[in-house]
Image: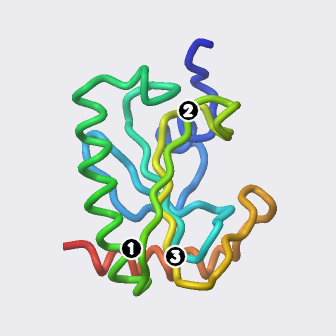
């Protein structure tokens, strides 16, 4: 399948759709997931066009993992949690947005994850959580 430049992450990267930014540099963007599985759920996306990890350049992958590590440390600190990282490739693996990305999901012992893509989070809460995570960035 060819990369779809109209996917939601491509639109966010072009500024056509608003997002709650946590971190941005030349190569990557980290945003709050508006349909989070847990409070503090962040998505890290490369600015390079790639549908999945197999299409991402080695340089793009290096920047993606470096940002994922940096932001995951901030999420861990801000949310006082452990961290689950997920990265899905292909519809059969559960990928629903075909622009490669990592999920950073805070986890607490005994707390269940919410179903993904079942409801939009409160935007004021997302904004506040994004601020808390940004403050925790080293």
Label 2 secondary element: loop
Number of numbered discs present?
A: 3
Q: Residues within 10 Å of mark 2 (few under 14, many from 20)?
A: some
Badge 2 or badge 1: first in the primary sequence? 1
Q: Quadrant of the N terminus?
A: top right
In the displayed structure, does residue 109 sit left or right of residue 78?
right
Badge 1 or badge 3: first in the primary sequence? 1
Which residue is nearer to you in this view: 72 or 85? Answer: 85
Residue at (38, 83) in percent of width and height: 78
Q: Quadrant of residue 119?
A: bottom right
Q: CA distance from mark 2 to mark 1?
A: 23 Å
In the displayed structure, does residue 107 sit left or right of residue 58?
right
Pointer 2 and pointer 1: residues touching (CB < 8 Å)?
no
Q: Give the number of the disc on residue 89.
A: 2
Identify the residue position indicated by label 1 in the image. 75
Residue at (26, 61) in percent of width and height: 70
Q: Give the number of the disc on residue 50.
A: none
Q: Position of residue 88 (x, y in %)?
A: 55, 40
In the displayed structure, does residue 111 sit left or right of residue 85?
right
Q: Position of residue 53 (x, y in %)?
A: 43, 30
Q: Quadrant of residue 47?
A: top left
């Amino acid at each position: 399948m060819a990369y779809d430049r109209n996917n939601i992450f491509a639109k966010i990267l072009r500024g056509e759709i608003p997002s709650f930014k946590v971190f941005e540099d030349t190569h990557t963007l980290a945003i709050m997931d508006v349909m989070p599985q847990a409070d503090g759920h962040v998505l890290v996306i490369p600015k390079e066009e790639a549908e999945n990890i197999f299409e991402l350049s080695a340089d793009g992958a290096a920047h993606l993992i470096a940002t994922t590590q940096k932001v995951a440390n901030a999420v861990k600190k801000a949310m006082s949690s452990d961290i689950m990282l997920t990265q899905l490739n292909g519809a059969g693996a559960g990928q629903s947005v075909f622009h490669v990305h990592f999920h950073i999901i805070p986890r607490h012992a005994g707390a269940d994850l919410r179903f993904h893509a079942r409801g939009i989070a409160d935007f004021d809460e997302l904004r506040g959580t994004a601020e808390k995570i940004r403050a925790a960035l080293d």
